[in-house]
Image (cartoon, rainbow, N blue to C red):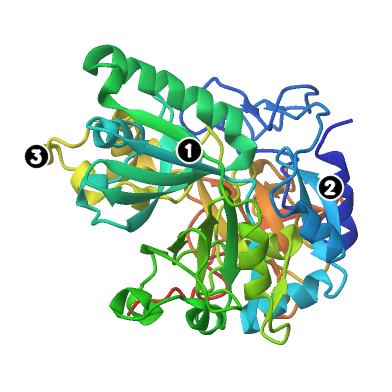
Amino acid sequence: MSTLQPLRRGISLLGIRSLTSQSAPVVSNGSRQAFRLRSAATRRPVVSFGPALPQLQVRFASSEAAGKTQLYDLHVARGARMVPFAGFSMPLQYSDLSHLESHNWTREKASLFDVSHMVQHRLSGPGAMDLLMKVTPSSLDKLHANQSTLSCLLEDGTGGIIDDCVITRQGEDSFYFVTNAGRRQEDLAFLQTEIDAYRSTNGADSIKWEIINNALIALQGPLAASVLQPLIHGSGPEADLTTLGFGNSRTLYLTLPDGSRTAEPLLISRTGYTGEDGFEISIPTTTPTLPQQVVDLLLVNPDQVRLAGLAARDSLRLEAGMCLYGSDITTAQTPPAASLGWVVSKDRRDPATGNTNFNGSSVILPQIASPAKTLSQRRVGFTVEKGSPAREGAIIVDLNDESRTQIGVITSGLPSPSLGGTNIAMGYVKQGMNKKGTEVGVLVRNKVRKATVVGMPWVETKFYRP
């Protein structure tokens, strides 16, 4: 049995299913690499999009033992419903709040998510910048110390998205970045190959790469800053969170109940995956009790902060128009096809800068310059008429074509808790059908439902910028 099946059952009972991909969007970059979630085991039928659009083979995982994050015992003690996800036993939701209540709590107050299953990396050395500038399309050389950017690891040649990630520049030649747990093996193999190739030319000491075994939690919601600020140890400008804007980080201590500071400093980044203001906090584990201590501090006032799980995290990120790797993006898409062309920095598009040489640039740059001529499909948002929601894998058809030729596929979809149950979805449609206001059909339970292409996000993001 696939490791994903128990999670699918749990999500289905909650009325959402977009946490795991039953299908994947079509190939847009010529990649012949089949997308895999974890390890290959069973193969689902290939989804056809008609003769004009290529096809993608999708493979799913075999059974494997689920790992535990540093906060597993806390989840069980707090009444979490645990499910296998990305190789770990993770909380789907907690006994004190339903999925809907937890979602709304995050939008109105603050929720705490355990995201320790994510992979935390540190890359340093004189070659760190060059290596990351090759495998991503971002202008990392323009980042200031402790500044972050969302980026993508790109497949050489095709420009396919190997993974999305957040990269923080911590020093002149030191970077911290976080990648997805579900892509751990693929990412590690990719990075090892790239690093080995760089070292073979520039020497073994040119790059140092390490995986950090820290716990990682996300405090998200409009009350996040007011909850965290009183816990910051010390005073002065660095301790003032009003001067810490979105996409920036600091290394700070928290104050324990006895007035002392935490045994080690924490990396606190103002970022998140919900569209709300919030922080991701990387907690060292050399002091084994530190993750539990930090979580206990943040949960002191249950009228302000509650624990939240994967179910709420998924519906929150979809409302914010954020992609889930494996559902909305894979190696089959380049950033422009996935409507992520903005991750390609402007100076990396201009040949005059000399910075246009990155993995897949020969494919990606023409797509940015002439999308109508070079892209067969685009990722867009939809609102779907009342009734059963359009889930991932639902076929998109042309309403003006009596033969109902397939023109795309839904990759994520659910009734929006913040919009009173309005059916929202994202997916891929063929070029020319991606303009806002375009009406298409979606096959839901063998019935054609009308959907309209809309802009994303559906719920305005509230990222804090001083």
Residue 397 visible from this viewpoint: no
Q: Amino acid at mark 1?
A: Ser
Q: Is residue 425 above or below residue 406?
A: below
**Secondary structure type for disc 1:** loop
1 or 3: tag closer to the N-terminus: 3
Q: Residue 352's mark?
A: 3
Q: CA distance from mark 2 to mark 3?
A: 49 Å
Residue 146 visible from this viewpoint: yes
Kindly identify which residue carries mark 1.
376
Kindly identify which residue carries mark 2.
8
Nearer the camera: disc 2 or disc 3: 2
Q: Position of residue 281 (x, y in %)?
A: 52, 61
Give 236 or 258, whichever is nearer the viewer: 258
Q: Position of residue 378 (x, y in %)?
A: 50, 47
Q: Amino acid at mark 2?
A: Arg
Mark 3 surroundings within 10 Å by alpha-carbon count, few (fewer than 14), some (14 through 19), many (20 or more): few
**Secondary structure type for disc 2:** helix
In the displayed structure image, the side of residue 135 where residue 217 appears, left or right: right
Q: Amino acid at mark 3?
A: Ala
Give 267 or 383, whichever is nearer the viewer: 267
Q: Position of residue 190 (x, y in %)?
A: 47, 24
* Quarter assignment of residue 227: bottom right
